[in-house]
Amino acid sequence: MNPPATTLAFVESPVQLLNVLEWAHAQNERAPLLDGVPTQPARGAASPSHGAEALRIIVLPPTDPMSRGQLRRVTGIARDEGHTVHWQEARGGAGAPFKALAALAGRVREAERIVVGDPFSRFVQLLLVPARAKELVVVDDGTATMEFLAQAGRGERLRRWHRTGGGALGRVKELAYAPVSGTARRRLTPAAGRRVEVFSSMPVTPLPGMELKVNDFGWTRSRFGPPRLTKGTDLVGTSLVETGVVDAGRYLEAVSRLTRQHGVTRYFAHRRESAEKLRALSEATGLEIVRPDLPLELIARRGPVGRTILSFPSTVVHTLPYALAGTGVRVTVCDIDPAWLTSTATSRARTFLAGVTDTARDVHRLPAQAAPAAG
């Protein structure tokens, strides 16, 4: 099938943008052949390096500086690949979302294929209302893809797994927004005349009529590495404290215990981890705190990286085995003890985190007794 004349991608995080680049690379890998040669973009179209399909990518940046910095770096890589990237501010002021919607609505209506990185994003859901695209693609925004398919399959409104109720005002807002969320869910569900694809590294089952393509990080592996391996162990941080799921004190105990037991020397911070928390971790453990300027899959692939990478249940326990395939790096996941959860954590948080660990492929799992003890 020839690529549509207009492909529009919306991303809000560095990981989403990386996965759009992976999707574009995979599109080229399975492009139709003409006399044994992949078809090329039309005359006058952008000509990406390495042959990937040229995309128009709209970056809708968050407000936190770390995410914005990583996005700037990955945006530069995307432009080097030949894609057109537009930076559109949609946050940071009362009028910003409305200005962004007005600026983008025309492009959304004209797009023949739309790629989204976060189906839970309210702004993306608003953009899908005027969409007329015959093809929609969802690329990973981490483990949230697992929850997206589960909720869509049950016909539920799209809601992040760690989000709490928000009180009476929150419920009123949810009810007022329900028509938009419902429209977005229908747009992202296969129907007559509309094709929906999920491009994912996660262990997911597509809905009836939905296509699933595996993201094996072929672009990352072709462009970076293999990495030089160090003798130490690296630990991947998580923002579960910042999202209100895990207690800060329990998390500090967990990191301290893992550092002692496994000879951890470096801590790769999640882009949403607070400076105060990281300072406390450094003082308590002596770890070198690394603030990556690119998604961890790229950082690890470029190296240097430890021969063992420890992680709590998160996206990287699914993505790093693909990105680091054949390098000899051992990825190990540490379970979240239920005693670490805060009193406001939802019951869904416990089962979701366990599912992230249980479904990880090609990773090692720490025995239960190796996890930090409660109390």
Image (cartoon, rainbow, N blue to C red):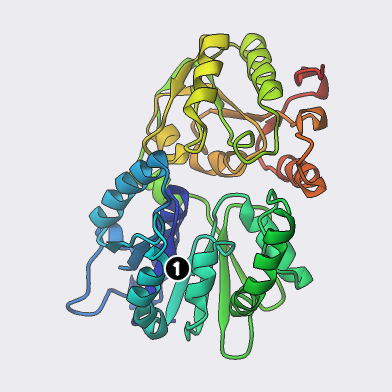
Nearer to me, 7 or 246:
246
User: Count of labels shown?
Assistant: 1
Give the percent coordinates (x, y) of residue 167.
Answer: 73, 55
- In the depicted structure, whether residue 281 falls above or below residue 142: above
Where is mark 1, residue-wise? 30
- In the depicted structure, whether residue 263 falls above or below residue 304: above
Nearer to me, 173 or 129:
173
- Structural crowding at the residue carrying mark 1, measured as other residues with C-alpha within 10 Å and reported as few (<14), some (14–19) or many (≥20): few
Give the percent coordinates (x, y) of residue 153.
Answer: 75, 70
Q: Is residue 39 visible?
A: yes
Specify the quadrant of the image occupied by residue 305: top left
Q: Residue at x 46, y 40 (%)?
A: 297
Specify the quadrant of the image occupied by residue 191: bottom right
Q: Residue furthest left?
A: 44
Q: Is residue 225 left or right of residue 199?
A: left
Disc 1 residue type (three-letter): Arg
Q: Residue furthest front?
A: 169
Give the percent coordinates (x, y) of residue 101.
Answer: 40, 73
Q: Is residue 3 visible?
A: no
Q: Is residue 106 left or right of residue 48?
A: right
Assign a secondary structure to mark 1.
Answer: loop
Q: Is residue 106 left or right of residue 154?
A: left
Nearer to me, 330 or 205:
205
Q: Which quadrant does the N terminus fall into?
A: bottom left
- In the depicted structure, whether residue 289 falls above or below residue 35: above
Give the percent coordinates (x, y) of residue 205.
Answer: 71, 63
Q: Residue at x 43, y 24 (%)?
A: 290
